[in-house]
Amino acid sequence: MNDDAAVYVLDSFALLAYLDGDEGMESVRCILFKALEELCRVVQSVINLGEVLTITEREKGLTKAQAVLASVEQLPIEILPATREAVLAAAHVRANYSVAYADAFAVAAAIESGGTVLTGNREFEQVEGLVKVEWLDHPI
């Protein structure tokens, strides 16, 4: 893959939209297809993945959450660990912007990677001056 390839950071909204077939699913699917062809990288913090699994288990049960995890592990998504550096970067974002703690990990990942956050969560409007945001309700 080209070192200059675009990097997309999925927040939980984007991954759930893809998994649930909600608005924005097609945009996420297109990005994942590009990642399969090694035309871009797709990353997600393990914290955001944990949020997806939490929401899925709460709404659909443990068996469905386990199936979602198995499905996600087959996708061309690089899961970023919650390293000390990532936690500190997310804490800094959270302290300075009114975003949820898990969302701060997506922002921190975008800062670190020079990537674009893919989301439909309007909370990210607050960080558009800090990172690039690609809105799922607009075609990519």
Image (cartoon, rainbow, N blue to C red):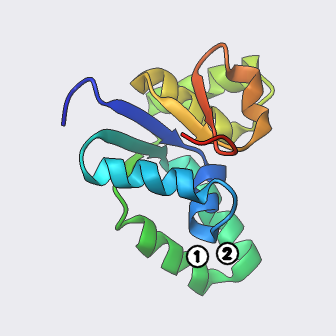
Task: Give the residue at x 32% y 48%.
Answer: 35
Q: Which residue is more in the foreground, 9 or 59?
A: 9
Which badge, 2 or 1, is on the more N-terminal residue? 2
Horizontal and vertical percent for residue 21?
A: 63, 68
Q: Which residue is mark 2?
A: 57
Please state which amino acid type lies under the numbered disc 1: Ala
Tell me whether the residue at label 2 lies in contact with that at label 1, contact meaning CB atoms closer than 8 angstroms.
yes
Q: Which residue is more in the foreground, 2 or 90?
A: 2
Whether 77 is drawn above or below 71: the answer is above
Q: Residue furthest top?
A: 129
Whether 15 is drawn above or below 63: the answer is above
Horizontal and vertical percent for residue 109?
A: 49, 31
Q: Which residue is mark 1?
A: 65
Callout 1 secondary element: helix
State the separation of the CA atoms marked 2 and 1.
5 Å
Q: Which residue is more in the foreground, 118 or 74?
A: 118
Please state which amino acid type lies under the numbered disc 2: Glu
Whether 63 is drawn above or below 113: the answer is below
Q: Residue furthest bottom?
A: 63
Callout 2 secondary element: helix
Horizontal and vertical percent for residue 84?
A: 46, 31
Q: Is residue 109 left or right of residue 102?
A: left
Task: Give the residue at x 49% y 50%.
Answer: 46
Quarter of the image containing the C terminus? top right
Whether 27 is drawn above or below 98: the answer is below
Q: Residues within 10 Å of mark 2 (few under 14, many from 20)?
A: some
Horizontal and vertical percent for residue 134?
A: 59, 34
